[in-house]
Amino acid sequence: MIWNKKERKNKRADTKKQATGFTLLLIPNSSDSAKTIEITYDRLLQLLTGAVAAAIIVIGLMCSMVYHNRKLKASIAETEASVSALKETNASLEATVSQLNDQISADKEAFSKIEDTITKKEEEEAANAEQAAVPNEIPIKNANAILVEDPYKDSEGRTMGIVFSTLKGAAVAATADGTVTHVDSDEENPFYTRGIVIDHENGYITYYRMNGDVSIEEGVKVSKGDVMAVLTDDGYVAYEIKADGSFIDPRTMIQE
């Protein structure tokens, strides 16, 4: 084996010149001097590793941001859908409220008409009741009644009103609505066997005297035309009216 000193020498030189890094030469524009920065491979590896780690972190953050952005968009879409549904529901409710208001208005109008009808009916009933309490009829029913001169005009039994001559079986009726306040017993009236008094509670009081059977009692409410007594024989019926405490001529009240 031939030993080649030159080759050995060259191998040593190569070994000495093996690179362990690199040098950056920096020359600023405003300066003539240059600066060098030596960077070893180990340092470069550290920098690259750090850069890769930073890139991974950035990519991870970007992925996370993309994920949360999509999630936020989905949430916003759901919220918008909910808002749209709420708007539709609100529109439906407003339509329902409008219909209800229309119905309420219609009901109010109907109720107003009903109230007007009721008021008119009440007014008519009140007017009828008021009219029914006015003694304006002849107190004789079921028989002819002839207006005659008072047979007791010259005695204590004289009538402060008018007298009718009628037949047996004739009915004596109330000439208006009211309450019976007095019924004579047989002994109380020497000229007529029975007498009836009705208070019509409107300032009018009517008096009925006759010879007959009385079928009404004190305290009973009567209506115009109610029969209160029946004549047992042909005879007379005396009829008197007081208006606000004073006797008046019944003929001014009787309607034909």
Image (cartoon, grey):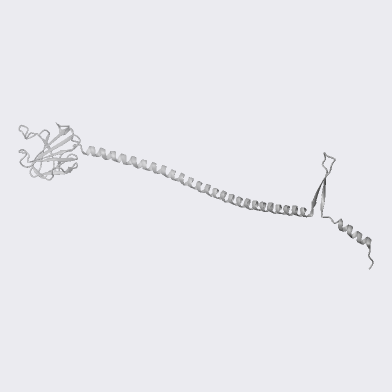
Tag count? 0
Q: Quadrant of residue 29?
A: top right
In the rendered image, the vertical position of residue 57 relative to residue 105, given as above or below? below
In the rendered image, the vertical position of residue 22 relative to residue 137, given as above or below? below
Q: Is residue 229 left or right of residue 80?
A: left
Q: Determine if residue 165 is in view.
A: no
Determine the residue positioned at 17% across, 40% down. Answer: 179
Q: Is residue 100 left or right of residue 114?
A: right
Where's residue 191, x and y in %? 5, 38
Q: Determine if residue 114 is in view.
A: yes
Q: Quadrant of residue 52?
A: bottom right
**In this view of the protein, which residue sits in the foreground, 192 or 67?**
67
Q: Is residue 197 left or right of residue 10?
A: left
**In this view of the protein, which residue sits in the foreground, 120 or 80?**
80
Where's residue 94, x and y in %? 48, 45
Q: Quadrant of residue 253?
A: top left
Q: Quadrant of the N terminus?
A: bottom right
Q: Is residue 71 left or right of residue 222?
A: right
Q: Quadrant of the C terminus?
A: top left
**In this view of the protein, which residue sits in the foreground, 122 or 47?**
47
Where's residue 108, x and y in %? 39, 42
